[in-house]
Image (cartoon, rainbow, N blue to C red):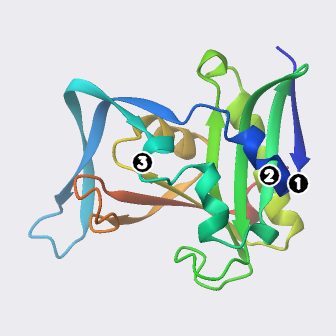
Amino acid sequence: MRIQVREESISALPDYSELPQRLTVRERFIVVPIGDGTWGLALELETVAPPFVKDYDRDNGHGPQGWAAQWDLSNWGVLAAFDGPIRIGGALIAWDTPGIQILDGNVDRALLWDIQVHEDCQRKGVGSALFSAAVQWAKAKGCKSMMAETQNINVPACHFYESQGCRLASIDPFAYPDHPEEVRLVFRLELRDRDG
């Protein structure tokens, strides 16, 4: 496999949306208080039985096709990974976008909004190549940090972000009113600490 990552315009979002946005959930993190809870929260891994499929595209229209209706995407970066002519992955980076809570109006912060790798190409370096390209994109905008949001049911994403040098920045059990069983986990990467 020869991975090539290149930036595309936001007009490529329909092509990006063809990447499957599904996850088979076999395990999840549960939130447990440290001590009596005054010392914070911790995550413990548990098996999910039976496993289930989380389809982000079908989740109340929150997939790529609905993002332009919710957000101003003019400051977003679209990255695509190819193996020859075949699209095998992609990443979206939000920057300087009013209304996105994690950015909180900070122009020195980017948010890795989404990263996808075709299931046949996972664990082959595609995600790492996209993540590195996202870091470079954020650095070019003058960002000092890059955030990434996922959920407690996406254990592979949590492990991936940690493998890329990110640290868990926040745990929010109340972030998703439509999905009260899911917990928002936000990871943070200090870009000055990241080479390349």
Q: Which residue shows up at 63% across the image and 50% down it? A: 64
Work out whether 10 lies above or below 87. Answer: below
Circle 1 SS class:
loop
Amino acid type, residue under disc 1 in the picture: Ser
Q: Which residue is mark 1?
A: 9
User: Where in the figure is residue 173, as x and y percent of width and height?
Assistant: 27, 64
**Dot 2: within a 10 Å radius of its alpha carbon, few (fewer than 14), some, or many (20 or more) residues?**
many
Residue drawn at x 80%, y 58% is 77
Return the residue nearer the eye: 84 or 17. 17
Task: Kindly report which numbered mark, 2 or 3, lies closer to the viewer in this rendering.
Answer: 3
- Sequence-first disc among 3 and 1: 1
Q: Which residue is mark 3?
A: 59
First-in-chain label (2 vs 3)? 3
The three-letter code of the residue at mark 2 reads Val
User: For mark 1, does the 10 Å Cα neighbourhood hold few (<14), some (14 to 19), or many (20 or more) residues?
Assistant: few
Give the mark nearer the N terminus: 2 vs 1. Answer: 1
Task: Look at label 3 and name its amino acid.
Answer: Asp
From the viewer's perspective, is residue 32 above or below residue 110?
Answer: above
> How far is disc 2 from disc 1 in space, using C-alphas?
6 Å
Residue depicted at x 88% and y 54%: 9
Residue placed furthest toward the left: 36
Q: Which residue is mark 2?
A: 78
Q: Nearer the viewer, residue 55 or 1?
A: 55
Judged from the image, the secondary structure of the residue bearing numbered disc 3 is loop
Q: Label 1 near label 2: C-beta < 8 Å?
A: yes
One can see residue 158 in this view: no
User: Among all residues in the image, which is located at the extreme bottom?
Assistant: 105
The local secondary structure at tag 2 comes to: strand
- Horizontal placement of 196 versus 88: left or right? right
Disc tally is: 3
